[in-house]
Amino acid sequence: MGKRVIIIGAVAAGPKAACRLKRLQPDWDVLMLDQDDLIAYGGCGIPYYIGGDIADESELRATSFQMVRDKRFFAAAKGVSVLTRTRAIAIDRDQQTVRVQDLDTLQEEELPYDALLLATGAQPIRLPIPGARLDGVYTISNLHKAIAIKERLADGKVRKAVVIGGGAIGIEMAEALTGLWSVETALVEMEPRLLPGIVDSHFAEMLKHHLEENNVKVYTGESALSIRDTGTGAVAGVQTNARSLDADLVIMAVGVRPRSELARAAGLDVTRWGGIKVNQRLQTSDPNIYAAGDCIALTSLVTSRETHAPLGSLANREGRIVADNIAGQPAVFKGVCGSFIMKAFDRCIGATGISYEAALFEGFDADYAIASPSDRAHFFPGHAVVVLQLVFDRKSRRILGLQAFGEMNDFISARVDAAAGLIAQGGTIEDFGTLEMAYAPPFSSAIDVINAAAYVADNLCDNRLRRVHLNHFLRWAENVANEPDWLVLDLRHPEEAAHYVQKFGKERWLSLPYDQMRERYQELPAGKTLILICNAGARSYETQVFLESVGIRDTLVLCGGLNVIARMGVRWYREA
Amino acid sequence: MGKRVIIIGAVAAGPKAACRLKRLQPDWDVLMLDQDDLIAYGGCGIPYYIGGDIADESELRATSFQMVRDKRFFAAAKGVSVLTRTRAIAIDRDQQTVRVQDLDTLQEEELPYDALLLATGAQPIRLPIPGARLDGVYTISNLHKAIAIKERLADGKVRKAVVIGGGAIGIEMAEALTGLWSVETALVEMEPRLLPGIVDSHFAEMLKHHLEENNVKVYTGESALSIRDTGTGAVAGVQTNARSLDADLVIMAVGVRPRSELARAAGLDVTRWGGIKVNQRLQTSDPNIYAAGDCIALTSLVTSRETHAPLGSLANREGRIVADNIAGQPAVFKGVCGSFIMKAFDRCIGATGISYEAALFEGFDADYAIASPSDRAHFFPGHAVVVLQLVFDRKSRRILGLQAFGEMNDFISARVDAAAGLIAQGGTIEDFGTLEMAYAPPFSSAIDVINAAAYVADNLCDNRLRRVHLNHFLRWAENVANEPDWLVLDLRHPEEAAHYVQKFGKERWLSLPYDQMRERYQELPAGKTLILICNAGARSYETQVFLESVGIRDTLVLCGGLNVIARMGVRWYREA
């Protein structure tokens, strides 16, 4: 006999589960409900809709074959019943019923289920600061908000905007506003840098510099304390702990929180931060109730800890797993690496696994290796520098994470995807060193950047490579008195080095090209710590090894080299 | 005490091993020799040099920091001695010496070694047909040949060309000739299709169609029998078994053979096809002699058989492994998946692992799953169809290979790279179904094509999806009498279907849109095999499941749908 399945939430995990379930069990009764009237949309497309890349919101709700995924579509094409503007208000686990309320008539009803899926998603956090509910202050919580923002922009009402929150959505919104609409946009992030929790600070700095190059004002390490009023209930600006910013529009994108009130009220296990707990089959603590999507706690495949990974891509995969399990065909979802990718104007930034900072915090014997070569064959037109970092555990030699910053194309997504699969399997430095990356000059280098970074990791682990940390070097460059014994040895072409020799003086910054080292190393002054510098770091390492062989041991390599410093927009570098 | 290491061959594996060895053991004496005077070049860049993407051959020999990697460079920068125009003519394994000959003075010398690396590369095969040595007939064997071809083109001497061989180099050369130089180019391939041994025939057909769209004449299943003469010793054309083609230039690109004569003469183990046998540490049957690069036999990580994978990328990785082992730091090279990627005009084709045809041949319970969705979010501008196939073993559910055809960007390289790592670890359909591909609308879809193809594989394996093979369908479309009971059910919008209904007639091609099926299935005629067709295959599968639930069981899905047929350039499809 057919079963009755109720699905609460109809954006990503819900529809995926509903449709798969009807394919596995066409005779079952699948009912999906949502408090909104707009359902089954690509929420991740909202910044691109606002930025004009997507003309109409209905495109976000359409299938690839141009049918709008509304109530009628789900009934006709999928055989799935949908109740919109219907809120689930309570679950009776003993009776196996859900109490729902029609938001228009306010009538309530008890709906029986054999299996229940909670796909209630996540909710943007609204900062509890004065003015947070003024007209013109938005969170990106659903398509209605997106439509309202775009109308406001189209009406020419927005000249200045402030985005609060330097995570992915905040940055994408800042691009959308400055791009198509030429709105003067400021981005405020409380943490000392962008993308906190996702990338390490030097990657965040490269991203910040690129945003600034594109006229986004970025204020990191600043908290929004209040939102100012025009006096007539509309937004006038944002007051941070450091400045006052004018704004006709404020976007709050300070993170999301799982929507798990219903689960908690029903007595299901929920983490402290609100993620619904599930097993690998995505069952909650009640085996008849499943949960999927932005409302659940997932297991990190790197740390084995609970983590929150609110992404449409995961929600869809999870929805399918739930359908399989409800249909009686066991399937498991093992966890997430935490893959991340983002467009920011002309650049792309991506990551998977955990950052160096997170790895230290987690108690790993953590280290990181940076490489900054050409993305494709350096003789192929259009090649560009990519900066890629592997995070690893020195003891086990396991790779824990990858971060990359480069041009806006699919190059970084390839490296993130290749790494995620391997990290999930516990891949080591050796696995990454021999990882078979497809090669032809238009696509990659004979030694791919991912292999190159693994080689650096190998050399670091085996203590063949002695490195100066980037931040340490940058502090010295700001004030050379910090390290009175340091002398930069610039291994690049003398013409490339000349400006810096002039700026820092010969006793601080010496030019000696890499290919003359074997002839001229005796010219090097004694009693100095030599900081070996080139563009990508490879020549520096090679020089370190050579100098060691002739008895000059006090040397340190700047891994990733000046390619990283250039992309961070460091002032002394740019001005030299 | 320092050791003496001799490296024979100075293109890719040789230089990589030499430089790494000097970094590990700076005091050792490393001598590299090559019979050519041009060394350490990116041979895979030759088609792009000829096609004008790369202006000067020296760019193929330069480092990323613009130093030309010649003899002087290796001595000054790397501390590696190089003998060019020097041929190794014999190895005395007992004495541990190599006899070398200076190709200018013809003087011979015995050089002692502690360890030896054979990095002798591979040699293009020259077909043993009349005229193979006429002026104007080239193989792409080294940089000198490339320079000669480009000079001939630059001198305006070439109006028509024939490329013999439809592998990667042949295709890249055909693009180079038609692209910049507007040479009328014909490509002749003996096998019934392009890229034999790399992709299955439907992928080869998509590639062929795109070459033809770009004015390359492609003749598959034709053998070059002789090369015609102008009467003055120059090439005049190519005679195949089917036609006579005029040509001022003939490129022979019919594959390469390992250069292993030296190894064989020294009594080292060599495969029947000439690959030098090595263990995982890349030692030959003589533990003091290593081999790396295009001259060796590698282990396939899919079939565990010996295979030949002549690629600069592998040569470099292998060179590093050899250096580690010689330096006393054990390292292993486990084998290859066989990753492949190629630009062809505006398209990209890629593969890893083995093809369906190869998997059948190898005795797997082989099957394949095709998906053809949008490469990125279908609401994101610039998205395009990608066709991706997974090859799998039905019994073990292990993924054996991947093939993809799509736009010329890095999208396919991402899927090949992600798959290669996982295939090497024995990944299954389930691993590919949950593979975490980084998601944001500009880069991918919420359900990535690689996940989508895994879902199709899952449905095939579990016999939920019953499929018609593409070739079977194409034969029917050529002559519907082949399957008198077949009726196509076109699930697309009626306007999309109309031309085909008209062409084939209603009794052969019926339009019934997907979202009207639940209302209208009773209109379907009885006693027919319904061939379910849509653009990508997803609607067809969904319809199959629904029809089954209402008792209509005689249905077959065309996986990948009309997206594949359109890209193959099938005539009836284009003309309808």
Image (cartoon, coloured by chain):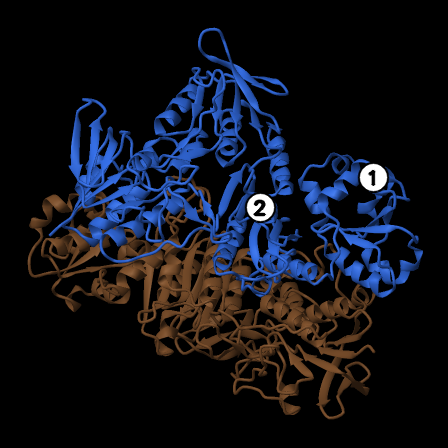
Chain colours: A brown, B blue
In the displayed structure, does residue A41 sit left or right of residue B1?
Answer: right
Tell me where residue B571 sits by quadrant.
top right
Tell me where residue A149 sits by quadrant.
bottom right
Residue B552 versus residue A115 in the image, above or below? above
Label whose residue precedes the other's in the sequence (2 or 1): 2
Mark 2 highlights which residue?
B358
The amino acid sitting under disc 1 is Asn
Asked whether residue A156 is in view, the answer is: no
Q: Residues within 10 Å of mark 2 (few under 14, many from 20)?
A: many
Residue sticking out furthest to the top? B231
Regarding mark 1 in the picture, which secondary structure is present there? Answer: helix
The circle drawn on residue B1 is none
Q: Which chain carries label 2?
A: B
The amino acid sitting under disc 2 is Ala
Give me the C-alpha separation between circle 2 and circle 1. 28 Å
* Nearer to the camera, A507 or B316: B316
Mark 1 highlights which residue?
B482
Q: Which residue is drawn at 15% across and 43% down?
A: A516
Q: Which residue is drawn at 50% across and 61% down?
A: A341
Q: Residue at x 36, y 38 (%)?
A: B42
Q: Position of residue B51 (x, y in %)?
A: 46, 30
Asked whether residue A416 is in view, the answer is: yes
Tell me where residue A431 sits by quadrant.
bottom left
Q: Which chain carries label 1?
A: B
* Nearer to the camera, B12 or A234: B12
Residue A95 versus residue A497 in the image, above or below? below
